[in-house]
Amino acid sequence: MEELPDDSITMEKQVVNSTSEQQQAINDTDINETEVLIQAKTIITNDNSKPTTHKRKTAKHKNEIHENMCICQQPPAGDMIQCNWCQEWYHNKCMSIKKDDNVAFWICVQCRTLPKVVKDIQSQLSSIIQNNTDLVKDISVKTDQILSLQAENSRLRNLVNKAKSSSTSSYCSTCNGDSDSDDNDSVCDISRRSNNTRSKRASVQSPQKPKPSGTLLMESSIIRSMNQDRFVLDIEPKCVRGGKVNDITDELLKLPKDTLLENVILLVGSNDCLDKNFNPDVFYEDYMTLALKAKSVSENVVVSGLCPRLDDKFGNISRANNILQKIANDETLHYVDNDDTFRLSNGSINVNMYEPDGVHLDITGTLSWPKT
């Protein structure tokens, strides 16, 4: 037995001499990853074994193997060897095979690594399929949330429209006619007295509406040092750490139905802006729903503009503030611009007002926020 250094291993079993039997054994054998990921490039028979001439071709066979190319991408030349697995031809020199080597069974590098490549691709496909499955579930959940919020938005819109229509005064159609008859005057006089009587009776029987009281701050933990005592708030602020616009809407929906507040301050939305797929239309709908819900519990709603953040790499906070200004104008809300308060004269963010993370306001920034 002769063993090639570094590049080969010794074949310790007898090599079948018959070419047809060798080929049949190859076809009947399933080569798995363990079998093909061998260290050697060639398997050498002993000196007494006959060389398998069909595994070598010289330059005179160019016309027969012109379609096969070695890894060197050069045309066939000199002695060549054929892979028993893929049937491709390679230069002996490129494969480090000597002329006097008797090679009985040889597999190229590509075929030896093929099972591992296939296994890696299968693993990647499984991961992609799982990710797609998770995305479908997330989309389904988000769709349900959007439908729920749209229904709540419609309900609040109807309440606002009813409130506006109820303030319209009624009138007597007879009084606005062109008739000058005394009968019409009598009818209108009776109608006026009847309406006055009903109004007095209703004013006596209907209970007096409770007077709105209290200022409620709704925020998403951007102001960590905010508390009831520091700003003399008569209601403990509601803070949803890491919360988005829909989370604050959910908190408002949890309030008792008869809740009437003197003021509602909204400071939320910057967490919605961190997504690179930030959708201005979706943000508008979400915040409009929040604003309408806030208006249903208070006539004075303050929309606090979003404070700049160091992690706003997509520039979405500026776009969101434009949306907040539009909503405040359309719904007659009070808008507070915080952008200039937390920036230096050169336009950069004043990090001295932030925690080290560049996101949450420190005590200096917290005390500066109400001044805006």
Image (cartoon, rainbow, N blue to C red):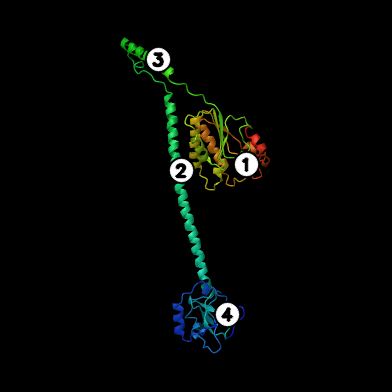
Residue 145, labelled with which disc? 2
Q: How many marks?
A: 4
Label 2 secondary element: helix
* Residue sitting at x 47%, y 52%: 135
* Comes first in the chain, label 1 or label 3: 3
Q: Nearer the viewer, residue 236 or 110?
A: 236
Mark 3 is surrounded, within 10 Å at the Cα level, by few (under 14), some (14 to 19) or many (20 or more) other residues, namely few
* Residue sitting at x 52%, y 47%: 277
Label 1 secondary element: loop
Mark 4 is surrounded, within 10 Å at the Cα level, by few (under 14), some (14 to 19) or many (20 or more) other residues, namely some
Mark pair 4, 2: CA separation:
65 Å
Q: Is residue 66 left or right of residue 361?
A: left
Contact between labelled residues 4 and 1, with CB atoms less than 8 Å apart: no
* Comes first in the chain, label 2 or label 3: 2
Q: Is residue 37 above or below residue 217?
A: below
Mark pair 2, 3: CA separation:
48 Å
What residue would you read off at disc 1? 360
* Comes first in the chain, label 2 or label 1: 2
Q: Quadrant of residue 45?
A: bottom right
Q: Nearer the viewer, residue 359 or 203?
A: 203
Q: Amino acid at mark 2?
A: Gln
* Residue sitting at x 46%, y 47%: 141
Residue 9, labelled with which disc? 4
Q: Nearer the viewer, residue 354 or 276?
A: 354
* Comes first in the chain, label 1 or label 4: 4
Label 3 secondary element: helix
Q: Amino acid at mark 3?
A: Asn
Label 4 secondary element: strand
Question: Is the N terminus in the top left, top right, bottom left or bottom right quadrant?
Answer: bottom right
* Comes first in the chain, label 4 or label 2: 4
Q: Position of residue 89 (x, y in %)?
A: 51, 78
